[in-house]
Amino acid sequence: MMNSTAADPPPTAVSVRDLRVRRGGRDVLRGIGFDVPRGSVVGLLGPSGCGKTTLIRAIVGVQIVRGGTVTVLGRPAGHPELRRLVGYATQNPAVYTDITVTENLRYFASVLGAPRGDVRRVIDEVGLGRHRDQVAATLSGGQLSRLSLAVALLGRPELLVLDEPTVGLDPLLRQELWELFGELAAGGTTLLVSSHVMDEAARCRRLLLMREGAILADDAPDALRARTGADDLEEVFLRLISQHVEAAS
Amino acid sequence: MSVGVTLATTRRILSQLRHDHRTVGLIVGVPSLLMILLRYVLDQPGMFDRVGPMLLGVFPLIIMFVVTSVGTLRERSGGTLERLMTMPLGKLDLLLGYALAFGLVSLLQVGVVLALSLTWLDLDLAGPVGVLVAAAVLCALLGVALGLLASAFARTEFQAVQLMPAFVLPQALLCGLFVPRDQMAGWLEAISAVLPLSYAVEAMQQVTQESGVTGTLLADIAVIAGCTLLALGLGAATLRRRTP
Ligand SMILES: Nc1ncnc2c1ncn2[C@@H]1O[C@H](COP(=O)(O)OP(=O)(O)OP(=O)(O)O)[C@@H](O)[C@H]1O
Ligand SMILES: [Mg+2]
């Protein structure tokens, strides 16, 4: 039944069922399940250490998992065909700091088999035009993380998985990047973006709120506001946690 | 595996080196300096003719071991390896890319040290220079392959640097550089017979002392090449797309 073609893509980009991951002797993900619809921006939010990076690593297929299934664009996570279709930006900028911005992008573009013009395009998209010949080690923190984001944009992947791409950026740049994410989604790209910052959450079509390796809520921002009766998403999150704790006790 | 990705990886590693003049200077300068020191410490032409060429095989091996093990460890700890593992890059593309890049660097290294030895230091060679260069570059590639393999056993740069003495010094002691292998205790000779550096040194001896290409030399070269391929294969097996 999985005879999906390019003309008829499955409606969900990522589908996770009962995902369990153990790291360092602790259960870091405890049976997580959710769907990411195609062509949308989904925010992954939750306190530090709740398992966002672990979940993202499972989706891009580099995390050893204990159980459950992760299906990405109709194939099991880590499938060789996905290596050209999924763009991934790690939480810490993963680029070669001893070569220039352009040299980094040229290398990753060759690995991906992306067209040559892509290097210039992604440099412009993340606003690093004036720094294209600068050695990555001399970039500022925010510039370095934008370079890492630019690598993920190479080859126009169908799914972009971005682990805290806006950390350390000023409000103006954050705004620009979120506009870029919106444009990409409008063009059919699916984005899963993790973040600490709740005001960014409002820009997502759906939110996954995580806590201690479990999903607390999986809904549209407005629906979450309505459900908790809070306006501010920070407040929404706090109320959801206390509801959760009450339900558990 | 893809030739394009392998060559792109080689190009990337070479541009990393191009931005790092000091490392290139050390790769070429240190063995040159040691060779000059050796020539004047020994101060007997016959002695230098015996030991000099052996070092021409040992230096590239040691230096390439250190450079590659630290280089690949940086890929692991810097997250670029994790990123590459989500991309259409074969494990062998990465390893061969490293081997090719550092093979080229070792060609430069061996060329400079050999030119210095043959002119200023009056090294006397019985065999063809080309074979000596080829054997020395092969030793460098063995160093690259062992370094790639060793980096899988190191978590930090400190550990990687410590692995050099662990991997290389026992081989250097047993390879016949200090004491000819047939004069060692039986069990030491037996150990030295399974260590690749012994064959590197023997190959170098053959090139210096015999005028033609001998059967022993060919056998030595086959052993070194075999060990290199084995280490690359094991290195590929230790690279995992999924990690804990
Ligand atoms: N390599 C590892 N070995 C053992 N435990 C780990 C490892 N990496 C992460 N952990 C643990 O797994 C849990 C989840 O980590 P993860 O990195 O997924 O959190 P996170 O939600 O991304 O946090 P942050 O917002 O701070 O990035 C944490 O408790 C962390 O200590
Ligand atoms: Mg994280």
Image: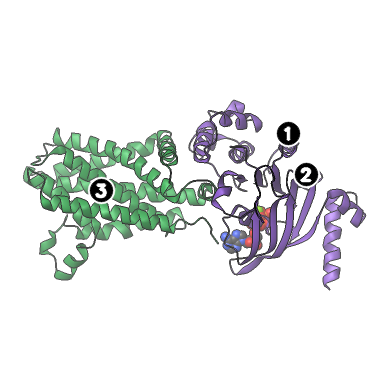
**Residue A200 is at least partly visible in this image:** yes
The x, y position of residue A66, in whole percent, is 60, 67
Q: Residue at x 56, y 55 (%)?
A: A62
Give the left or right position of residue A84, taking residue B52 as reference. right
Per the image, the residue denoted by label 3 is B139
Q: Which amino acid does label 3 sit on?
A: Cys
The chain holding disc 1 is A
Per the image, the residue denoted by label 1 is A176
Give the left or right position of residue B8, taking residue A30 as reference. left
Q: How crowded is mark 2: few (under 14 residues within 10 Å), some or many (20 or more)?
A: some
Q: What residue type is labelled 1?
A: Glu
Quadrant containing the N terminus of chain A is bottom right
| Residue B109, picture quadrant | top left
The x, y position of residue B244, in whole percent, is 55, 62
Per the image, the residue denoted by label 2 is A200
The chain displayed purple equals A
Asked whether mark 1 and ligand 2 are closer than 8 Å, the reply comes as no
Q: How crowded is mark 1: few (under 14 residues within 10 Å), some or many (20 or more)?
A: some
**Residue A50 is at least partly visible in this image:** no
The x, y position of residue B56, in whole percent, is 21, 45
Residues at marks 2 and 3, CA–CA distance in whole angstroms: 55 Å
Residues at marks 3 and 1, CA–CA distance in whole angstroms: 52 Å
The x, y position of residue A137, in whole percent, is 53, 37
**SS at mark 3 in the image:** helix
Tally the numbered discs.
Answer: 3
Classify the position of ligand 1 by quadrant: top left, top right, bottom left or bottom right. bottom right
**SS at mark 2 in the image:** helix
Using the rendered image, report if marks 1 and 2 lie on a common chain: yes
Please say which color scheme the image uses: by chain
Q: Which residue is drawn at 19% across and 34% down?
A: B115
Using the rendered image, report if marks 2 and 3 lie on a common chain: no
Q: Nearer the viewer, residue B157 or A76?
A: A76
